[in-house]
Image (cartoon, rainbow, N blue to C red):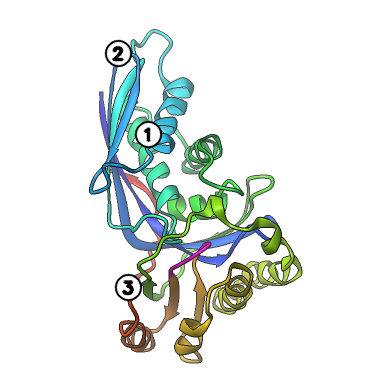
Amino acid sequence: MDGRASAPAAGTILNALACGKGSAFAIDAETTATVELDSSGSFDADIADAPDADTTLIERCVELVVAEYADDGADISGGHVRTESEVPMAAGLKSSSAAANATVLAALDALGVADEVAHEEACLLGVEAARDAGVTVTGAFDDASASMLGGATVTDNRTDELLAREPVEWDVAVWTPPEQAYSADADVERCQRIAPVAELVADLALDGRYGEAMTVNGFAFSAALGFSADPMVEALPDVAGVSLSGTGPSFVAVGEETAVEQVRDHWSEREGTTWLTTTQNDGARTR
């Protein structure tokens, strides 16, 4: 029983660590998962180009899907997952959410029920797996929903409620420094001190003012998490929005193609990797 699916990465509009509300937008860089289900009695996984990476999250995704959706009479007690990704790990670009979404959909595909399960329902399984695996503080429903549904989403991660979702059309510049930053290691208490600013960002996002929202978020969370805001200053005022993505270390800028290309040129002088992409409005899909 085999299945295959892909899910996009995402950039941050509002980090949910401060007030529980979050917002993100899907970008055109994907993680693909291939799932093979069997009766071996155990689930295992491997991540292409990262043989030592922790695979607890993607293994847990398959376990939850099988427990929830496999027929009672089916002899499915194990399987293997392999993920391949264009998304750098621990870079603030929602690699975990993309991997979880792709794995959940691939497992549903292997069971032959992918078309019967709503994407938002499938997304929540990945969120549950992320909480079980301890790779997220908030559950990351904001990141996961943007990756699964495409476009920009606004969520309340405390209740797993989708508050808004709409397509967005931007060119995107991404700068990823050489270092990594894991969401589970973020200083939550320090982030919660900027909750009044985060509530303002949530209001802007719910009003559809995503560019302004992400810029305010970026300055606030750069300060809270100890990142320099210089990359943001380099991008302004020409882009529609720019922010630290997630808990870093990546920064993302969105806007018209010419403005975003200029940002790419500035950021390319920095150590690390700079690349251009676009928003993605289709979300995750089986292949």
Q: Residue at x 55, y 50 (%)?
A: 184
* Residue 114 image label: 1
**Of callouts 2 and 3, which one flags the residue occurring earlier in the amino acid sequence?**
2
Position of residue 226 measured from the top left corner of the image (x, y, whole percent): 57, 71
The amino acid on which the numbered mark 3 sits, given as a three-letter code, is Gly
Q: Earlier in the sequence, mark 3 or mark 1?
A: 1
Residue, x 67% and y 66% (percent of image)? Answer: 202
The C terminus, quarter of image? top left
- Left or right: residue 284 versus residue 184 is left
Q: Residue at x 46, y 52 (%)?
A: 149
- Residue closest to the far top: 73
Image coords of residue 122 (percent x, y):
47, 38
Give the image quarter of residue 37: top left
> What amino acid type is highlighted by mark number 2?
Ser
Tell me where residue 48 sits by quadrant.
top left
Is residue 231 inside the magenta stretch? no
- Among the two numbered marks 1 and 2 on one chain, the one whose residue lies closer to the N terminus: 2
Q: Position of residue 203 (x, y in %)?
A: 70, 69
Q: Which residue is mark 2?
A: 39
Displayed quadrant of residue 274: bottom left
Q: Which residues are magenta?
A: 246-250
Using the image, tell me which numbered label, if any, was put on residue 127. none
Q: Residues within 10 Å of mark 1 (few under 14, many from 20)?
A: many
* Residue for point 54% across, 36% down: 128
Q: Secondary structure at mark 3?
A: loop
Q: Nearer the viewer, residue 53 or 46?
A: 53
What residue does disc 3 label?
272
Question: Closer to the observer: label 3 or label 1?
Answer: 3
Please state the horizontal and vertical placement of residue 148, each as a whole percent of the image.
Answer: 44, 49
